[in-house]
Image: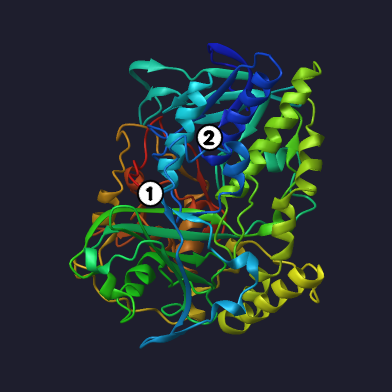
Amino acid sequence: MADTGVERESMEYDVVIVGAGPAGLSAAIRLKQQAEAEGQEINVAVIEKGGEVGAHILSGVIMDPKAMNELFPDWKERGAPLDTEVKDDRFYYLNEKGGFRFPNFMFPPLMSNHGCYAGSLGNICKWLAEQAEAMGVEIYPGFPAAGLVIEDDVVKGVVTGDFGVARDGGHKDGYQPGMELRGKYTLIAEGARGSLAKVLLEKYGLNSDSEPQKYGIGLKELWQVKPERFKPGLVQHTMGWPLDNKTGGGSFLYHWGDNFVSVGFVVHLNYKNPWIAPFEEFQRFKTHPDIRGTFEGAERVSYGARAITEGGYQSVPKLAFPGGALIGCSAGFVNVPRIKGSHNAMKTGMMAAEAAFEAIKAGRQGDTLTAYEEAYETSWVAKDLKKVRNAKPLWSKFGTFIGVMLGGVDMWTNTLFGMSVFGTMSHGGTDAEALEPADQHQKIAYPKPNGVLTFDKLSSVFLSNTNHEEDQPVHLKVKDMELQKTSELEVYAGPSARYCPAGVYEWVKDETSGEERFVINAQNCVHCKTCDIKDPNQNINWTTPEGGGGPIYVNM
């Protein structure tokens, strides 16, 4: 909610979009395309918390060009940065010493990556922003949406964060209050676990009829490898080691561009063992005998981490609310078995834009865009998600080996017969509720990094170019510090220090009193949102820091 006690400047638009990712930018472009086609004017603003477009964008990425073909049929001629087409598609199951490859014929056609492109989603978003600005869209990087403008139960826009607030809450020299950006409709495209989306889901009960959203944490490094190790167009996925059978997740290696290999590791955040450390699992994965050779003599050039929505079809909430809609990963459209969501994000942004444009053309504003909901329900996004809806719950229920096999059978029956023998399975509780007390599990001894193939968190965060103004309020809000000690530390053995991929959280023993103190190194935060998702008591709330703070990802 907007702070009405502060006098703020206001700017008026037809549509305000929060987030310059693939969903938000596709929505902005579609609005302008429709206005141009009908000879009308429409004012569109996009605000982005990153210091530049693409700065906070992190994905594998293997892009299915389906949505891009609809948005810009001539995207190749326009110079979209999608140059490396998938040529070799491999999937392996690993054990500690080796593993085996699954034959491609085992997978239903929807799982094939042929016809898709490897690259950088950050670069794609930069290119989309160029197209949008050329059409007259106003894009404002470095302006996080810190609050909502809600009047008479209708979302009227957003409030950007204040600048120049000191850590103690006082105003520094040059203090500037945030601005109100008001629109006839507001589209929320914050990505996974967005701070405004959380408010909207609760206020309007958008998730009252859906399953809890599920998440994974995706960790990624970009390497430039030796030419003899580079195989352009190779896409390789694995599951199994180093994760045990009860812990979901897997890896990817994508060869693209100028001898680049994107290597990533995903850990499903419904894991039970609080001793698991996703970052250390990622580093350990690279030491596998079938993996490490790729990186011999190579240079690690970037690192990042981001939460991924994994709930799929049954976790998609109601998409529209009075005055706006959720698009992209704010609602959760990732296809988990395909490890893809960018094309779905783009398509949902386009559908919401079409609904908003028709409403504005008809003279409406501030109502619920039911046309967007209806368009989604009959779209290829919903149809594809429905086919794979049981892959995640089967994996969670039966473990990696059996669960993935059953998921494959279920996808085949959905593909061939349009039905599932399992119906639509439930996810159960939230990822936070899945965590079990530390005394029920054995502590994991992770190997020390060698600085050549495996690394520590702080040197990795350095490669993400992460920075926050030190004298600003801590944007990671602990609701009850005593609960953090009596439960997060004493029951769960302080998992925040392990699930955070950036070294933000520490439990430090006071030398005098011997008391454990919870330390938050907020300047390290890469905005992955894992703490907001996985804290067992939901005691940590991620909020937007001062504009422009956070990582500056390059080619990620």
Instruction: State the residue in front, 143 or 199.
Output: 143
Residue 489 occupies quadrant: bottom left
Residue where numbered disc 2 is placed: 19
- Give whichever of discs 1 and 2 has the lower sequence position: 2
Question: Is residue 164 rendered to the left or right of residue 362?
Answer: left
Disc 1 crowd, CA 10 A, few/some/many (<14, 14-19, 20+)? many
- 246 above or below 268? below
User: Residue 165 appears at what percent x and percent y?
Assistant: 38, 25
User: Residue 485 appears at what percent x and percent y?
Assistant: 45, 59
x 59%, y 43%: residue: 69
- 150 above or below 69? above
* Mark number displayed over residue 342: none
x 36%, y 74%: residue: 285
Question: Is residue 293 rendered to the left or right of residue 506?
Answer: left
Residue where numbered disc 1 is placed: 556
- Number of on-image labels: 2
User: Residue 265 appears at what percent x and percent y?
Assistant: 42, 65
Question: Is residue 315 rendered to the left or right of residue 498?
Answer: right
User: Residue 59 appears at what percent x and percent y?
Assistant: 46, 52
- How did the renderer colour the structure? rainbow
- 448 above or below 139? below
Amino acid residing under circle 1: Met
Question: Is residue 222 rendered to the left or right of residue 89?
Answer: left
Given this view, does label 1 or label 2 mark the residue nearer the observer?
1
- Does any portion of residue 425 appear in the rendered image? no
- Does any portion of residue 388 appear in the rendered image? yes
